[in-house]
Image (cartoon, rainbow, N blue to C red):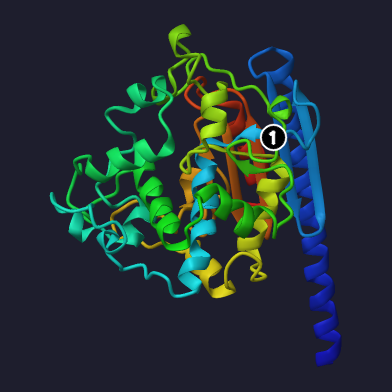
Amino acid sequence: MKRREAVLTGLGLAMSHRSCAAMLFASAERAAQVLQSATQSGQIESAALYVRHGQREFNRAFGEASSVDASFLLASISKPITVAAIMPLFDDGEFRLDDPVQKFIPAFRGDGRERVTMQQLFTHCSGLPDQLPENARLRAAHAPLSEFVSDAIKTPLLFAPGSKFGYSSMGILLASEVARRISRKSIAELIATNVCRPLKMTRSALGVGHLKRKSLVRCQTEQAAPESGAGNADTKSWDWNSDYWRQLGVPWGGAHGSAGDVARFLTEFLAPQGIVVKPETARMMIRNHNSIGMRARGLGFDLGKRLGGPPRENVFGHSGSTGTLCWADPTTSSVCVILTTLPGRAANPHPRSVASRHIAESIEE
């Protein structure tokens, strides 16, 4: 009797799994219709959608994207990719999460900087600003990444380290500088060596890397983020589409990648295989590290309901100001990646959010 009950239970779980997958992919079709309509109307120039549940996948390109392998400017989806490239150094014992940043960057001192830890850089609690006050000047001058680092080291903190959440691209920049000083490799090299090659993310790189410049999807810049020039004509030499910005490869927002590659990245944390970091490190990275009352953040990853996926606290992923969004749901082993060229602030609701909601609703419990 017990064996029969076990068999029936197994059949029930299999049927439930198939039912969930069927609902998910029906929703993926509805999400695709949203993106198809947005590209046909001209609201979005290019988009790509990738959905995976178990071994089944749904992958489609829209508008001017040449194929599902098209490489988009990922914007802040670059942040978890950057942190993932840094964390093998953690696995090797080169740093601890509670290490002060000053241990590796001696000039990072004064104004409370001595209290900033590596974990606070990863979780946006360091007090460092999102963008530098001199961001536009540096970009207009086509400054190298090293100048951004120098200015980030001495820029005033906005609040006491660890006292609250404050989204900080400069925190990710200084984390990558620590990694550079430890490894003597650029963050672009670390991403290529530690993330893209092991995961076979052949359509991805920090900056242009091995990708052909003409193969990169063009960003729409009207109503773009202020730090990227907001679409003004006099910022074309340093906006999202400029050769300068594409090649600079900023660790907080300069990665390019295809929807399928981003899905491969998320899957390594959804079901850790030890390809990028140790499985226990991967699981730690998608767990909340911030104090109660602060916005939940993993190491590099955003967490929870704000992602626009299923309304569960264990959902992880990130979004980007160029119009990108990705999330993974451990409860159902589902992955969703939506890449568009419409700036995130250019529409409310943004088609990426509408498409994501279609998919998320099919797997809510």
Return the residue at label 1: 71
Relative to 248, is 10 above or below? below
- The crowding category of the residue bearing disc 1, from other C-alpha atoms within 10 Å (few below 14, some 14 to 19, many at least 20), is many
Count how many numbered circles sit on residues in the image.
1
Residue 349 visible in rendering:
no
Image quadrant containing the C terminus = bottom right
Furthest-left residue in this view: 111
**Image quadrant where residue 1 sits:** bottom right
Residue 320 visible in the snapshot: yes
Where residue 172 appears, as percent x and y from the top left, is 40, 48
Amino acid type shown at disc 1: Ser
Position of residue 209 measured from the top left corner of the image (x, y, whole percent): 64, 40
Q: Position of residue 191 (x, y in %)?
A: 58, 52
Name the one closer to the observer, 2 or 31. 31
> For the point 29% across and 59% down, which residue is it?
101
**Image position of 304 with respect to 11: above or below:** above
Residue furthest to the top = 233
Residue 77: x and y, percent?
A: 54, 43
Is residue 63 shown above or below 179?
A: above
Q: Residue at x 63, y 52 (%)?
A: 192
Q: In this rendering, would 232 be left or right of 127?
A: right
Pick out the residue farthest to the front. Answer: 184
Q: Is residue 325 left or right of residue 345?
A: right
SS at mark 1?
A: loop
Q: Which residue is found at the position 68% from the left and 18% from the top? A: 45
Camera-side residue of 36 and 47: 47
Residue at figure coordinates x 55%, y 67% from the top left: 282
Residue 10, quarter of picture: bottom right
